[in-house]
Image (tube, rainbow, N blue to C red):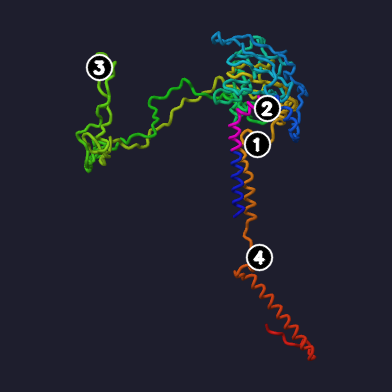
Amino acid sequence: MELKWLLYVTLLALGTLAVQAHDMDDDNDGDDVVDIEDDLDDGTEEVEESKPETSTAPPAPKVTYRPPVPTGEVYFAESFDKGTLDGWILSRAKKDDTDDEIAKYDGKWEVQDMKDTKLPGDKGLVLVTRAKHHAISSKLSKPFVFDTKPLIIQYEVNFQNGIECGGAYVKLLSKTPELNLDQFHDKTPYTIMFGPDKCGEDYKLHFIFRHKNPKTGKYEEKHAKRPDADLKTYFTDKKTHLYTLVLNPDNSFEILVDQTVVNSGNLLNDMSPPVNPPREIEDPNDQKPEDWDERPKIPDPDAVKPDDWDEDAPAKIADENAVKPEGWLDHEPEYVADPDAEKPEDWDEDMDGEWEAPQIANPKCETAPGCGTWQRPMIDNPNYKGKWKPPMIDNVNYQGIWKPRKIPNPDFFEDFEPFKMTPFSAVGLELWSMTSDIFFDNFIICTERAVADDWASDGWGLKKAADGAAEPGVVGQMMAAAEERPWLWVVYILTVALPVFLVVLFCCSGKKQPSAAEYKKTDAPQPDVMDEEKEEEKDKVDKEEEEEEEANEEKLGRSPRNRKPRKD
């Protein structure tokens, strides 16, 4: 019991000290600043001399940045570590059907270090301005032709300020004679659009390709199904994320974020609208016959309204058994004019009419069951049946829901190789954003997965390692939080120390059996101990008697083996 009280007092004292320390920190914050400023010059040497030697934590492992280098054939690779926009072309175009004030692509792009970077020297392309149209593009080393090799496009994005409404997707610009990067705009033909996009609470990861109709030659956008994964974190955590699209010659595709698959499918089955149109379509000229009956049920034509069916009976009737409550004030109105109201001084009866005091609840009615003319309450009419209608029966002439007949689709085609898209020769960013400082880095377009993985390891992988090295461990985070909020020590004590104390308490505080010495100090009986002593004393006496008997037999010349056993 004493141990329990000691535990409770200890925990209470620790909690009180922690809370007091927190209050003292809050009360003395301003004073501490003034004292430090006043005594800084006088006390510096004294503090340095009296400062005890403390062990410092080992420094976090340093991650050194080196620009990534492609390990195989690539069509495009850009890390921006030269610090310039060499090779990139800023658009000078204007959007069609847009006010001149916002039609220009005058958004600003710069090559900068990432905010709060842990890798000095690692630069990237930054969308600097907000609420503007931005467009920038760059040529590939050679056009990409879809044949027997996969297409892999990969790049990094960091929404350094979060994202309100805007995109960070790339466009692979189709190879056409009319392609002019200086006039790159929203209508410039592209082959693939890929990347993150967000507005409001709609978080998207686009994969769109433009498919050419082999019969008409027209292009139609095909959108990949929405991923099942929750994408919100990639837009809100202000970390660098790696976006990868893998498109294979067998029409399969994978979309990865941070090297984890978040969406996959097939160009023939998982795009909307489908690549291949249906074989048959509804005849647009077909019309429903006038005598077509779509009614599954009809009123029974042979049904007759019963003679006792009263359609005029009301749904509610007055309760004849109700009695007016005693004290009901029949001659008092529920509302009366406010006797304290006064006509406003600026009231003009010619303009405003005759003034009347506002109505208030009659104070006489507050203590009465009610005021005014009493009326019986209304109850449901047991004889009410409503308007009679014949019952519904199956329609013998029912023909089902009419649909127009099917005819062969005149625009039908089958394209079993949608992977063979229009070749592209440039990569571009054409974006509108309400948030600034979107960071892009480490673009690569290639055909080998290993090349893309090596590029990711040397770029995004280094960023991830640097961020991990800079983050404190769990214990460090807890200690830092407690330094800022001393009351957290109470939480730590209750969640860590308390269970330990309870284990010790219950394991070590079992009831002890009193010793024989304790019994000797009192007259209390000790049954177990006394029984054992009596048993030992009896055995001792029996043994002595047996030894004495054996000695007597030997004197008489008799063998102890021949004696009869003694009965106890």
- Which mark is first along the chain, 2 or 3? 2
Rendered location of residue 313, percent (x, y): 24, 37
SS for tag 1? Answer: helix
Residue 515: mark in rendering: 4
Mark 2: amino acid? Asp
Observer-nearest of 491 and 304: 491
Mark 4: amino acid? Ser
Q: CA distance from mark 1 to mark 3?
A: 74 Å
SS for tag 4? Answer: loop
Label 1, residues with CA under 10 Å away: few <14, some 14-19, many ≥20 = some
Label 2, residues with CA under 10 Å away: few <14, some 14-19, many ≥20 = some
Which residue is label 1 attached to? 478
Residue 29 included in the magenta stretch of the image: yes
Mark 1: amino acid? Met
Circle count: 4
Which residue is label 3 attached to? 353
Label 4, residues with CA under 10 Å away: few <14, some 14-19, many ≥20 = few
SS for tag 3? Answer: loop
Q: Are marks 3 and 4 in contact (CB under 8 Å)?
A: no
Residue range highlighted in magenta: 20-39
Is 232 left, or right, of 121 in this rendering?
Answer: left
